[in-house]
Amino acid sequence: MTLEAMTDAVISMAVESWRFGRVFDRLLTKLNAGENNRYKSQFRWFIKKVEEALEQAD
């Protein structure tokens, strides 16, 4: 796999994670407050990890 292909793959994964985030936010509105906070916290951790990986990949 070339560097360009690897970069494209990482970018694609990041974009899809952000798209999933929008869907996930809509789903969270259907949960009670306790569940909402728990899952929102887990998703924030996931997005943080995606952002860290993007920073490492430049």
Image (cartoon, rainbow, N blue to C red):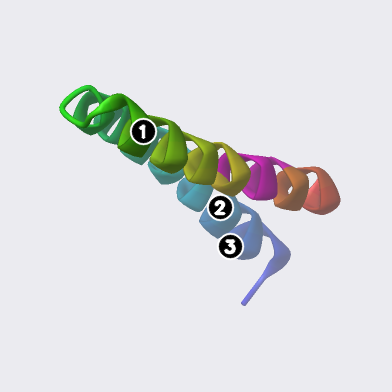
Q: Residue furthest bottom?
A: 1
Vertical placement of 6 versus 44: above or below? below
Instruction: Indicate the amino acid at tag 1.
Output: Gly
Q: Amino acid at mark 3?
A: Ala
Say left or right for 43 vs 56: left
* Residue 49 spot, x, y in % from top left: 67, 50
**Mark 1 closeness class: few <14, some 14–19, many ≥20 residues within 10 Å:** few
- Does residue 46 appear left or right of residue 25 in this picture? right
Q: Position of residue 20 (x, y in %)?
A: 33, 40
Name the residue tied to disc 3.
Answer: 5
Q: Secondary structure at mark 2?
A: helix
Residue for badge 1: 34
**Left or right: residue 1 compared with residue 9:** right
Residue sitting at x 53%, y 58%? 9
Screen quadrant of the C terminus: top right
Q: Secondary structure at mark 1?
A: helix
